[in-house]
Amino acid sequence: MNVSRIFKHDPDPIKLKELFSSDERCLEFLAEAKWKDGYVCRKCGNTNYCEGKTPYSRRCTKCKTEESATAGTIFHNCKFPIHKAFYIAWNVCKAREDVSTYEFARRLSLRQMTCWNFKTKIRQALNEMDSLTYNERESIQKILE
Ligand SMILES: [Zn+2]
């Protein structure tokens, strides 16, 4: 799921504040965005699921494949708390001011290099989408959805 889709709708300020301080709220938010149009198992196409082992993950009732809320998003395998990653991603995608990686590091108590790496990852994901034609983007989004 493309990063710009995740933030397609602006959460209200109270919700944003929660997202920037709680990993669990972030996972909930991602799961909502990801399965907005219903759950489909990536492996077998089954639409029935039960709860997975990690918060807000889903497990296919047929083939037992589990999909986490972060799988297929820029937050997958993130090495630092996801609410901090969320803060960076939201600022890069949505905020008007260009926050430096030094400033992110200061605000989030992370290493500057960590912030730089993640910011670069987001920028690349956004650029890749921008360089595609409308039809290409549409078909990729369909696959990612
Ligand atoms: Zn399945």
Image: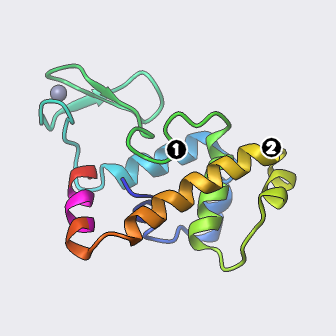
Judge left or right: residue 48 versus residue 29: left
Instruction: Look at 68% across and 36% down and name the residue there.
Output: 80
What range of the chain is rendered magenta? 137-142
> How far is the residue under mark 1 from the one under mark 2?
16 Å
Q: Of helix, strand and loop, which mostly describes the magenta segment?
A: helix
Which residue is more in the foreground, 91 or 116? Answer: 116
Question: Tag 1's secondary structure?
Answer: loop
Element class at badge 2: loop
As drawn, which residue projects farthest toward the bottom?
96
Q: Residue at x 72, y 43 (%)?
A: 114
Give the labeled residue for mark 2. 110
Residue 88 percent location from the top left of the image: 66, 57
Q: Residue at x 56, y 68 (%)?
A: 93
Instruction: Determine the image quadrant of residue 132.
Output: bottom left
Of the image marks 1 and 2, the number of the one nearer the N terminus: 1
Crowd rating for badge 1 (residues with CA inside 10 Å; few <14, some 14–19, many 20+): many
The way the protein has been coloured in the rendering is rainbow
- Determine whether, in the image, residue 37 is placed left or right of residue 110: left
Please, what is the three-letter code of the amino acid marked with disc 2? Leu
